Image: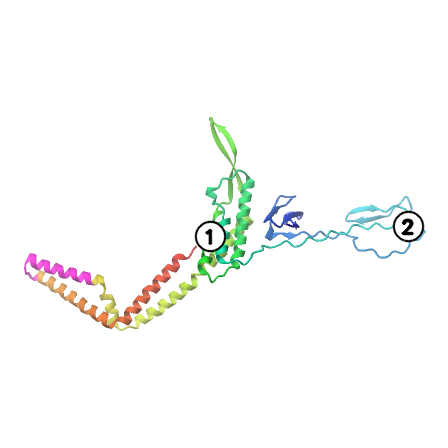
Amino acid sequence: MAIYMVKCPECGSATELNDEKDFCFCTECGMRIAKEDAELYVPDPAPGTEAPAEAEPEAEADIPAPDAPAEAEDDGVLLSIPDVPGAPPIVPPAPPEPAPAAPAFDVPELPNAEQVSWLMLRQPQPLDSVVFHSSDECAAYVGDLHSLILEARVRYSKMNHREEATCLDFLDRAMGCCDMLDAKRLKFLAGTHMEKSKVVEDYGSYPVSKDVLKDIKQAREEVLEAYNGFFKPKIAAAKEALEETKQKIRELPAAMRFYHAFCTPVMGILTAIWLAVGVFAVVKGGASAANIAILAVGAILFVTWAVLMVLWLMKGSGARQLYKAADRQANEVRTYRAKLKS
């Protein structure tokens, strides 16, 4: 553990920061200072701290009179030099040594699965399931969530992005953490009072810092962009392959395109139903001209469908493969688009 002196960005005073903590509060104005935003406090050098040159022994004539003591200025404070002949000059104390630099997050390079476990173990509860009893509890919740999101962003940069499944799991959970802070003001239970012989709860309001909300919003946008970055190239590749397949289908002979449109199970069922209706009409209604026409049309359509289906199965294997590839590529585009988050 080490203590660092950091500068408050609000009032400029010095404040102690424990390197085991993620933030501290200014002892002068009370502002919360995050460790990653902390700036080292370096005091201004006091005037007159330069090492004095070897002074020659002063003559007695240069010694100030007792009733007019000489004065030396040190950082706005006048120091009187005693009127003792031969007395050594008063040298102001040297400025303190500058504090060491504040450490950044020390993130080890861990496997992706361990990074996901790390995020799962530190994920706080959503706001709708948390009851705060003071503004300090609200501040602690916001501070922990803020630090978790910022560190998760750093940890993701050290993950193996070729392991797509664990990266997507980590990013999805990180977005969930960003969405937990969905209110600009948090309510906490400040006490109770009696009203009409009933206990009524009193609530206070804790405002969340705009800087914290801005950090979380920016982190969520970066996490969202990284998440969608896994699917956008796949969508583009699938769409390009689909366009190439469609172009090949457009170059097929007209007969092959007609076979594909006509030789379908649905068309076979419809022609079979028409034929069955014609047979039923002739059997039940007699061999009238209308019934015979219905039967003849149904028979012609069904036979035509059966013949074309045989030809399609015998000669259209290449065309069938193109149509199947187009359906598969279209499904890939729809699947990847469904996984995109907004």
Nearest to N terminus: mark 2 or mark 1 = 2
Amino acid, disc 2: Gly
Q: Residue at x 17, y 62 (%)?
A: 271
The local crowd at label 1, few if under 14, some if 14 to 19, many if 20 or more residues have their Cα within 10 Å, is some
Secondary structure type for disc 1? helix
Q: In the figure, is residue 321 to the left or right of 147?
A: left
Q: Which residue is drawn at 50% across and 49% down?
A: 121
Q: Which quadrant would the C terminus be assigned to in this image? A: bottom left
In the image, is residue 126 above or below residue 256?
above
Give the residue at mark 1: 173
Give the residue at mark 2: 86
Magenta stretch containing residue 108, yes or no? no
Give 115 or 197, whichever is nearer the viewer: 115
Q: In the figure, is residue 37 to the left or right of 290?
A: right
Q: In which quarter of the image is residue 208?
A: top right
Range of magenta residues: 268-289
In the image, is residue 271 above or below residue 149?
below
Q: Quadrant of residue 292?
A: bottom left
